[in-house]
Protein backbone atom coordinates (compact mmCIF):
# COMPACT_ATOMS: atom_id res chain seq x y z
CA UNK A 1 0.00 0.00 0.00
CA UNK A 2 1.26 3.37 -1.01
CA UNK A 3 0.19 6.51 0.80
CA UNK A 4 -0.07 9.56 -1.39
CA UNK A 5 1.01 12.86 0.04
CA UNK A 6 -1.61 15.57 0.15
CA UNK A 7 -1.34 18.40 -2.33
CA UNK A 8 -0.07 21.60 -0.85
CA UNK A 9 -1.93 24.81 -1.63
CA UNK A 10 -0.31 27.06 -4.17
CA UNK A 11 1.73 29.94 -2.82
CA UNK A 12 0.14 33.35 -2.91
CA UNK A 13 1.51 35.75 -5.50
CA UNK A 14 3.85 38.41 -4.20
CA UNK A 15 2.34 41.90 -4.00
CA UNK A 16 3.43 44.34 -6.69
CA UNK A 17 6.46 46.40 -5.80
CA UNK A 18 5.82 50.05 -4.96
CA UNK A 19 7.31 52.61 -7.32
CA UNK A 20 10.40 54.34 -5.93
CA UNK A 21 9.87 57.73 -4.30
CA UNK A 22 11.93 60.59 -5.73
CA UNK A 23 14.16 62.51 -3.42
CA UNK A 24 12.44 65.53 -1.96
CA UNK A 25 8.97 64.24 -2.85
CA UNK A 26 6.47 63.49 -0.15
CA UNK A 27 5.24 59.99 0.31
CA UNK A 28 1.70 59.66 -1.14
CA UNK A 29 -1.04 59.92 1.44
CA UNK A 30 -4.38 58.12 1.29
CA UNK A 31 -6.14 61.11 2.77
CA UNK A 32 -4.76 63.84 0.52
CA UNK A 33 -7.38 65.77 -1.41
CA UNK A 34 -7.16 65.60 -5.17
CA UNK A 35 -7.21 68.66 -7.34
CA UNK A 36 -10.58 69.27 -9.00
CA UNK A 37 -10.91 67.63 -12.38
CA UNK A 38 -12.50 70.09 -14.77
CA UNK A 39 -12.67 67.53 -17.55
CA UNK A 40 -15.85 66.19 -15.96
CA UNK A 41 -17.77 69.36 -16.77
CA UNK A 42 -16.34 69.46 -20.28
CA UNK A 43 -17.41 65.86 -20.87
CA UNK A 44 -20.95 66.63 -19.66
CA UNK A 45 -21.14 69.58 -22.05
CA UNK A 46 -19.89 67.51 -24.99
CA UNK A 47 -22.41 64.74 -24.25
CA UNK A 48 -25.29 67.20 -23.98
CA UNK A 49 -24.41 68.56 -27.43
CA UNK A 50 -25.00 65.05 -28.83
CA UNK A 51 -28.53 64.75 -27.38
CA UNK A 52 -31.43 65.02 -29.80
CA UNK A 53 -33.95 67.18 -27.98
CA UNK A 54 -37.67 66.89 -28.82
CA UNK A 55 -39.38 69.84 -30.48
CA UNK A 56 -42.34 71.69 -28.96
CA UNK A 57 -44.97 69.55 -30.71
CA UNK A 58 -43.39 66.26 -29.58
CA UNK A 59 -43.09 67.56 -26.01
CA UNK A 60 -46.75 68.61 -25.96
CA UNK A 61 -47.94 65.29 -27.41
CA UNK A 62 -45.89 63.18 -25.00
CA UNK A 63 -47.06 65.29 -22.04
CA UNK A 64 -50.69 64.65 -22.99
CA UNK A 65 -49.95 60.91 -23.27
CA UNK A 66 -48.32 60.82 -19.82
CA UNK A 67 -51.22 62.72 -18.22
CA UNK A 68 -53.80 60.45 -19.89
CA UNK A 69 -52.06 57.23 -18.86
CA UNK A 70 -51.54 58.51 -15.31
CA UNK A 71 -55.23 59.41 -15.04
CA UNK A 72 -56.32 56.02 -16.38
CA UNK A 73 -54.02 54.08 -14.04
CA UNK A 74 -55.14 56.24 -11.09
CA UNK A 75 -58.81 55.63 -11.89
CA UNK A 76 -58.21 51.90 -12.25
CA UNK A 77 -56.33 51.62 -8.96
CA UNK A 78 -58.95 53.80 -7.23
CA UNK A 79 -61.69 51.47 -8.49
CA UNK A 80 -59.83 48.37 -7.33
CA UNK A 81 -59.24 49.98 -3.93
CA UNK A 82 -62.94 50.88 -3.66
CA UNK A 83 -63.99 47.32 -4.52
CA UNK A 84 -61.58 45.78 -2.01
CA UNK A 85 -62.65 48.16 0.74
CA UNK A 86 -66.34 47.32 0.09
CA UNK A 87 -65.50 43.59 0.08
CA UNK A 88 -63.69 43.92 3.42
CA UNK A 89 -66.55 45.98 4.82
CA UNK A 90 -69.18 43.43 3.75
CA UNK A 91 -67.39 40.18 4.57
CA UNK A 92 -65.16 41.03 7.52
CA UNK A 93 -66.78 43.92 9.35
CA UNK A 94 -70.43 42.81 8.91
CA UNK A 95 -70.28 39.02 8.73
CA UNK A 96 -73.50 37.30 7.62
CA UNK A 97 -75.37 35.74 10.53
Image: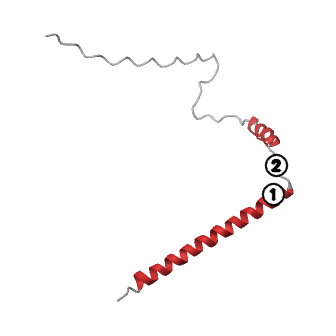
Residue 72: x %, y % from top left: 66, 69
Specify few, some or many for label 1: CA neighbours under 10 Å numbering under 14, 14-19, or 20 or more. Answer: few
Q: Secondary structure at mark 2?
A: loop
User: Residue 28 location, x and y as percent?
Assistant: 59, 26
State the SS at label 1: helix
Q: Position of residue 36 (x, y in %)?
A: 72, 37
- Residue furthest to the right in view is 56
Please tell me whether residue 92 is drawn above or below residue 57 in the rendered image.
below
Residue marked by disc 2: 53
Give the position of the N terminus as an image quadrant: top left
Answer above or below: position of 55 versus 85. above
Q: Residue at coordinates 82% horizontally, 56% vertically from top-left?
A: 58
Residue at the extreme front? 96
- Taking the spot 44% from the left edge, 84% from the top edge, the residue there is 90
C-alpha distance separating marks 2 and 1: 9 Å
Q: Position of residue 56 (x, y in %)?
A: 86, 57
Amino acid sequence: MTIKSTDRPARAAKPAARPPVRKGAEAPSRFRFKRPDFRFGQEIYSELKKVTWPNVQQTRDLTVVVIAISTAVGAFLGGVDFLFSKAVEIFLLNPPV
